[in-house]
Image (tube, grey):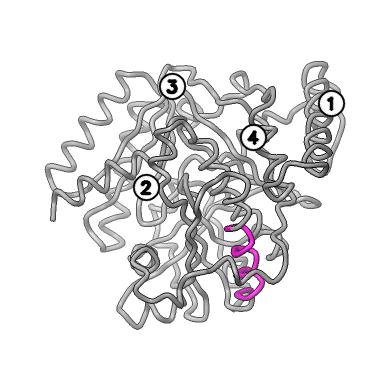
Amino acid sequence: MDDFYQTLEASPDFRSVFDQNGFLPVPDDWFVLITDIVGSTKAIESGRYKDVNTAGGLTAIAVANVYGHMDFPFVFGGDGVSFLLPITYLFPIRSAIADTIGKVRAGFDLEMKAGIVPVQELYKHGAKLYLSKFEASTHYNQCSIYGDGLSLAESWIKSEEDESFLVRETEKITDADFTGFTCRWKDIPSEKGEVISLIIRPESTDYETSAKLISRVLNFIRTEFGEEEDYHPVATKQLFLDNGPNLKKEALAHSGGRKGIGYLFRLMKIWFERVAVDCFIRFKIPFRSFHYRLDRLKEYQVLSADFRKYDGTLKMVISGTKENRLALREYLDDLSHQEKILYGMHISNRSLMTCILKVGSSQEVHFVDGADGGFALAAKELKQKMKQKI
């Protein structure tokens, strides 16, 4: 059932995923792939949040280039990505991830852990795993994942009880292909003063109960923050091309983590493209590249921004005022006291964006996270609350 996900009917928007039971069970001949930056919290606290995001995003383009397109289920969590994939692609993807582990270490001095767990194994242990998708834009279908299968797979990988689940750097057969990975935007200031990185975990494992609860939260956000365009963390007038640091990270990723002639040529190419794009935007020159009109490049970033998702937890990056945030925290605290949810929240004044483009196609996704830690630090708060409850 390799085409299982492609043939799923896409919901028209994110909210509609929770208004109807559109989740279908993942085929038992698929596998879960989870990647994670080890010690990401420590790296973030030392100011390396962009390195962590970049390293996490590389796995998505490595898998996409094995797959040949981007219409497969994956969820970006700030310091790693979770995938659901058919068994047909197991060996080439395993090799690509093995190589990515080595290149992340060489280029960013970060340790990446990756593991692969067969869905069939999760089902044997009574876990559930369901999928749906919605049309985030004409260029990107985003998945939503329900069930306890992902959390069980993650616990097995992190515990290392069964080392056969782990992907080792020595398993590399061919090089990982990062073609389509770009990182060319400055951090994006919030127009309203704050950027909230939010993770909400429903306490109930029942789908209908969880779906209704998430719908309530989304309704509150709509009431307090406004429509999606009002709290979207990526605003075109706040988007500016980077002047150097992020361009160097992109060049380093494409040169295999080694500075040399290859790195310098890549950096020069990126700088040339950056200057050209800046001219197209500044002077409104309607030049086309693939599906892009480059003078409208900022609009594409907003359209396919991956700023809200569901993988058993609701993950959102929201722009708002301090008053909006205080009202949201009060509302979530009330749900927590009712033992309906646990949540983690991190506050910054800006967001950051890492871009994944499938070159030669119209498919793209722009991963959005809060600056200075975002999802990783929101997850830290959530985990602390989970420990306190035990």
Kind of element beneath mark 4: helix
Q: Which residue is nearer to you in this view: 27 or 227?
A: 27
Image location of residue 181, percent across then percent down: 69, 46
**Mark 3 to mark 4 CA distance (whole Å):** 19 Å
Q: Of label 2 and label 3, which has the lower sequence position?
A: 2
Query: Residue 24 is drawn in which quadrant?
Result: bottom left
**Residue drawn where x is 33% and y is 26% of the image:** 224
Using the image, determine if residue 372 lies above or below residue 376: above
**Mark 1 to mark 3 CA distance (whole Å):** 29 Å
- The overriding secondary structure of the stretch rendered in magenta is helix
Q: Which residue is mark 3?
A: 349
Q: Which residue is mark 2?
A: 314
Query: Residue 4 is drawn in which quadrant?
Result: bottom right
The residue stretch that appears in magenta = 89-101
Q: Which residue is mark 1?
A: 276
Q: Which residue is nearer to you in this view: 279 or 268?
A: 268
**Mark 1 to mark 4 CA distance (whole Å):** 17 Å
Kind of element beneath mark 2: strand
**Mark 2 to mark 3 CA distance (whole Å):** 21 Å
**Mark 2 to mark 1 CA distance (whole Å):** 38 Å
Q: Which mark is residue 317?
A: none
Which marked residue is nearer to the observer: mark 2 or mark 3? Answer: 3
**Residue drawn where x is 68% and y is 65% of the image:** 67
Using the image, determine if residue 69 lies above or below residue 53: below
Q: Which residue is mark 4?
A: 301
Name the amino acid type tagged 4: Gln
Kind of element beneath mark 1: helix
Query: Which part of the image, by quadrant, shows the N terminus?
Result: bottom right
Q: Answer yes or no: do the residues labelled 2 and 1 have beta carbons within 8 Å?
A: no
Q: Of label 3 and label 4, which has the lower sequence position?
A: 4
Kind of element beneath mark 3: loop
